Amino acid sequence: MIVFGASTYNTACKIDGDSYVQGSWQQWRDGKVVEFSVVSDEANGGGIDKLERCFPKFYAKIWLDGISTTPPKTYWSDARPEVRCDSAIYLTSHYGSGCIFDKVAAVYETTETRLGVPWSGMGDPDNVNVAYRSVASHIWTAQHKKELTLPKRADKSIPGHWLGASGPLSRNVNARWKIKNNGKSRNMCRLLFKDYDRKDVELGKGPKHKVYECDEFPFQSTMQGTWVSVERLNSPDAYAYSNRPVWWKRNTEDGRRLGAFYGSRRILGEDGTRRKTTYDHFWVEAHVPGQNPH
């Protein structure tokens, strides 16, 4: 017989339900599986986001059924996974409390689905259904053709690229800082793109019929956004970002996907007051079919 089991160590976390499952060799060979749930009591969490780290460990116990003189042998796994649990209020409202393997690299991926090259309107600047007016293509350009992004800077280095060397991103959960990021980006778009304030009754958004929103990369919800990365630190503006007018529908779509990424990966953020620790870094990878390297 073979038993697979789990326990925890150096933590108040517990294994929920059965802590082991027994089966014959033939049952395991034929596909029998086992899963264990590690649970954290919110009351044991620390800080404003109620963080707790759980340390599960796993073992197999083997013995020959029906032969009492053969003692069981227990084999502990060398793997020592670490689980982080939280009840951050900006996550629980939509995703509840939860736990993740936070040592796994978090990569937000987005893919272009519209025609055209990612860095140009292809001579049709009013066409909102081309790649150029989409978020994925804007990110791809910022990652692979920084020299074509605005505002211009010869030695620009934009963080966040999973395959790059300019560092990761981290989440900003300060509502005022997000507004500051967005406000600075809008001003940049208005200054740099003459069509930014374009209006169209059919294509535009809301009663003002505005067609474009100013997309920024790194995102306005990051600590590397246009305002937070510069003015908050009172540092020179290295233009380590890119701005581009994109169709508001595309901006909304990608914003929802990014929000789902934050929630499902439980990306913790900073606000400069109660949350000053950077717990999570993440990267971004934009895919544009037909473009090297994607």
Image: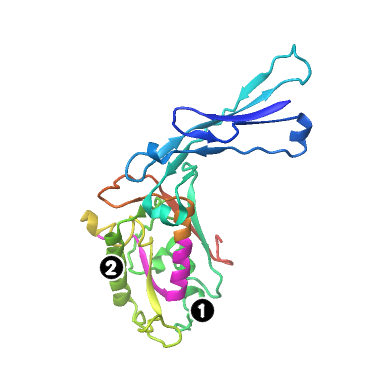
**Residue 164 visible (yes or no):** no
Q: Tag 2, which secondary structure?
A: helix
Question: Can you give x and y, in whole percent of width and height, for residue 179 in the image?
Answer: 29, 65
**Image mark for residue 264:** none
Q: Look at the image and tell me whether residue 99 can be seen.
A: yes
In the depicted view, which residue is nearer to us: 270 or 112?
A: 270
Q: Residue furthest left?
A: 234
Q: Could you say which quadrant of the image residue 251 lies in?
A: bottom left
The residue type indicated by label 2 comes to Lys
Residue 33, compared with residue 294, is above or below; it is: above
222 inside magenta stretch = no
The segment highlighted magenta reads 237-258
Magenta-drawn stretch contains 255: yes
Q: Looking at the picture, how far across and down is residue 76, in whole percent?
A: 59, 25
- Mark 2 → mark 1, Cα distance in angstroms: 26 Å
- Disc 1 marks a residue whose amino acid type is Asn
Q: How is the image coloured?
A: rainbow
Q: Say which residue appears at 40% left-offset and 47% top-offset.
A: 87
Q: Quick one: 108 or 70, which is closer to the camera? A: 70
Whether residue 8 sits left or right of residue 167 in the image: it is right
Residue positioned 58% across, 66% down in the render: 289
Give the residue at x 42% y 50%: 267
Q: Quadrant of the N terminus?
A: top right
Name the N-terminal-most of marks 2 and 1. Answer: 1
Quadrant location, the C terminus: bottom right
Q: Which residue is mark 1?
A: 129
Q: Is residue 208 above or below residue 239?
A: below
Mark 2, residue position: 184
Task: Count neighbours of disc 1 (C-alpha within 10 A) and say few if under 14, some if 14 to 19, many if 20 or more.
Answer: some
Give the quarter of the image for residue 75: top right
Query: Crowding at label 2, few (<14), some or many (≥20) Cα neighbours within 10 Å?
Result: some
